[in-house]
Amino acid sequence: MKHLRYFDALSRHRHFGRAAEASSISQPALSLQIKELEELLGAALVERGARQISLTGLGEEFALRARDVLRAVDELGALARASAGPLSGRLRLGVIPTVAPYLLPRLMRAVSDRYPELDLRPREAVTPKLMRDLAEGRLDLALVALPISEPSLIEHVLFDEEFLLVRNALDAHLPIPPVTELPAMPLLLLEEGHCFRDQAIAVCKLPPSPMGEAMEGSSLATLVQMVGAGIGVTLIPEMAAEVEGRSAPVALHRLPDPSPRRTLGLVWRRSDPLSDRYSELAAGLNEGLAAK
């Protein structure tokens, strides 16, 4: 199992140094573990180059099978935990970047209140990476915008929230434009990979990958600062209003009905032995987040 975990890290990072760091061991120790695994198998798994490594044909196939084995072993551990009472131990939670800075502190308090023995390990990443890590067993739960519409996953809605229009403070006195007028404005969007970008594009009825029609930023904070500098307008989720609204000279407005909004919720693998416990956790969060 130790060899499989080290090889899985190497297959994901394709770099001995980064894989060793992710595995919390030294690079020479990781290299030795991979060589031992190849000797056990009697075949090469890795092609070592001067600057990078690649997997052999066997290595690529072996990485997929090893990932399945590791996921199954983790699920055996989860099965044991499921029979031992309330949720406890490590829980790996993925959170999208447009939620993590604003909701995660409240969520962690709500979880801690209900499950004091639970060790919540949050990880922030964009939705496609969270879905890959969830499918491959590197995450237990993910907090994302719904729907995901993946049959192998269970989705639990937590709440809906509106999108707010952010304009420069000097424009606060102007009439609030309807959503249909936003495409004609200098609209700032998150860079590709963020689901909030896709939602904003859908709301504003922009092309899937607008070229030259919108400016991009790496985070909601960056977008708001750009608006404060007079570069354009943007949309942010309501949960970000309190933090971002006071970080720059901007004005925040609710858009006319029907106001755009998103649905947030938890997703987890349908095959996870702790699936019923996650349903209880999600239902508890519905109550805990609503009360805070």
Image (tube, grey):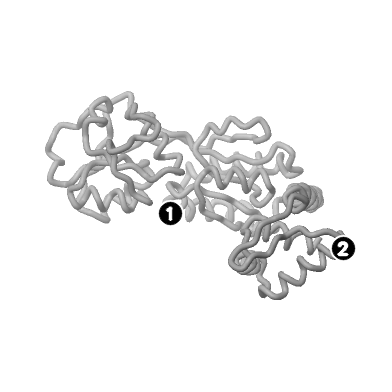
Is 143 on the left-hand or right-hand side of 90? left
Residue 204's disc is none
**Residue 207, picture quadrant:** top left
Q: Disc 1 versus disc 2: distance between alpha carbons? A: 46 Å
The nearer-to-camera label among 1 and 2 is: 2
Label 2 neighbour load within 10 Å: few <14, some 14-19, many 20+: few
Task: Report x, y in % for residue 178.
Answer: 24, 27
* Of the image marks 1 and 2, the number of the one nearer the N terminus: 2
- In the rendered image, residue 50, in percent from the top left (x then y), is placed at 61, 68
Position of 201 with respect to 111 (left or right) is: left
Residue 162 against residue 104 in the figure, above or below: above
From this view, report whether residue 186 is shown above or below residue 101: above
Where on the picture, by quarter, is residue 2? bottom right
Identify the residue at image location x=58%, y=56%. Answer: 112
Q: Is residue 22 above or below residue 204?
A: below
Question: Is residue 78 at all visible to an observer of this figure?
Answer: no
User: Is residue 113 visible from the viewing direction of this image?
Assistant: yes
Most extreme residue toward the front, as rendered? Answer: 50
Q: Residue at x 50, y 47 (%)?
A: 126
Which residue has dot 1 on it? 101
Nearer the observer, 154 or 17: 17
Q: Amino acid at mark 1?
A: Pro
At a point 48% along the width and 44% down the height, the residue shown is 291
- In this view, the residue in front, 113 or 152, is 152
- Tell me which amino acid carries mark 2: Leu
Percent coordinates x, y for residue 243 in the rendering: 33, 53
Residue tagged by mark 2? Answer: 40
Residue at disc 2, secondary structure: helix
